[in-house]
Image (cartoon, helix red, strand yellow):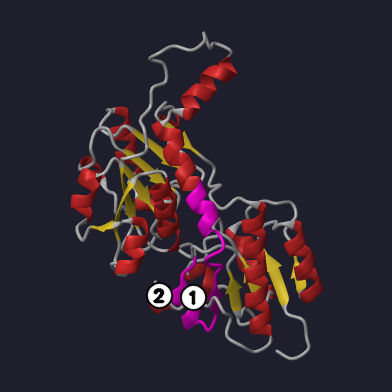
Amino acid sequence: MGSQRLSVVVTRRLPEVVETRMKELFDVELRDPDTRMSRDELAAAMRRADVIVPCVTDHIDANLLAQAGDKLKLIANYGAGIDHIDVQSARQRGVLVSNTPGVVTEDTADMTMALILAVTRRIPEGLAVMQSGNWQGWAPTAFMGGRVGGRRLGILGMGRIGTAVARRAHAFGMQVHYHNRKRLRPEQEAEVEATYWESLDQMVSRMDVLSINCPHTPATFHLMNARRLRLMKDGAVIVNTSRGEVIDENALTRMLRAGEIAGAGLDVFEHGHEINPRLRALPNVVLLPHMGSATVEGRTEMGEKVIINIKTFADGHRPPDLVVPSML
């Protein structure tokens, strides 16, 4: 790309240290105020930039890419998940796509564990009573939850995050089970005493807690559909810190209301920030605003990865976190 600085458009505000470094390195256009770009704004940004830095709230589909013109060369996504980008169409147009894998692993696994504890120990119900000022003092049978130690945890998707969840759960004394496209190596299973299930249906029907840790792809859309959710035990809990589309949210809401599933902890939702009001109203559900990766350290490291991907590309090399369609 020679000595000329790349023009970069960032679609949302990023941590200050990341934005400062971008200003030093590139001809960068930052987003102010921090609102989501409309489709027209995104299309215009893609026409005037060499590189666009989107995140999970920007849906870059084939139609949008068709409006991009010839200037755009790289979509350097801020985040690991790339289900909001049509990678295939981008590559056909000669546009590379990169992401930021690995940096949110520990943070997301921490949040998964927090949700498991919050739901099984009824933390939000206790919190609500304290905040209302109606607490009458300790009682032997009040707010009784369940002990996590000894419970069976089923992990759906044993990638980096699933494995990190397994390590934490094992330390809490939970029995670790998992379903994955590929079975782990024996020494990886041994580390957390994990049991592999080839059949997702069989695993789901025997678990006390189910944690969703797989990406959203066409193959995983509504993987936890109404039929599969019905296989869960009445006393089971489901936790999702990956992508909302993996669960049929309407079916889950119906079953939680009917007491056919004991509880849920959700950090992601099927329809973005539009949450089903019936789901919001349930006392046995913990809902968080997609904050699994929201640590200062994690979000800064994501930005550093974006910068490395753009910088490597600017120097004429392949970005280290290039997303290849065959990976999806």
Residue 184 visible in this rendered orientation of the protein? no
Residue that badge 1 annotates: 323
Calculate the distance from the C-alpha at mark 1 to the C-alpha at mark 2: 7 Å
The amino acid type, in three-letter code, at marker 1 is: Val
Q: Residues within 10 Å of mark 2 (few under 14, many from 20)?
A: few
Q: What kind of element bears circle 2?
A: helix
Residue 4, how many percent across, how many down?
78, 86
Q: Is residue 231 left or right of residue 303?
A: left
Q: Is residue 104 left or right of residue 280?
A: right
Residue 301, how many percent across, how many down?
64, 63
1 and 2 marks in contact (CB < 8 Å): yes
Residue that badge 2 annotates: 327
Q: Residue at x 45, y 78 (%)?
A: 324
Q: Residue at x 61, y 67 (%)?
A: 43
Q: Is residue 151 above or below residue 260?
A: below
Residue 69, how many percent across, how many down?
60, 78
Q: Within the image, what quadrant is residue 46 found in?
A: bottom right
Residue placed most toward the observer, 65 or 172: 172
Q: Is residue 130 above or below residue 75?
A: above
Q: What kind of element bears circle 1?
A: loop
Q: Within the image, what quadrant is residue 75 found in?
A: bottom right
Q: Is residue 90 above or below residue 260?
A: below
Residue farthest to the top, as pictured? 136
Q: Residue at x 40, y 48 (%)?
A: 169
Residue placed most toward the observer, 123 or 254: 123
Q: Within the image, what quadrant is residue 95 found in?
A: bottom right
Span shown in magenta:
85-110
The amino acid type, in three-letter code, at marker 2 is: Met
Does the segment drawn in magenta span residue 114?
A: no
Q: Residues within 10 Å of mark 1 (few under 14, many from 20)?
A: many
Does the segment drawn in magenta span residue 108?
A: yes
Residue 153: numbered disc: none
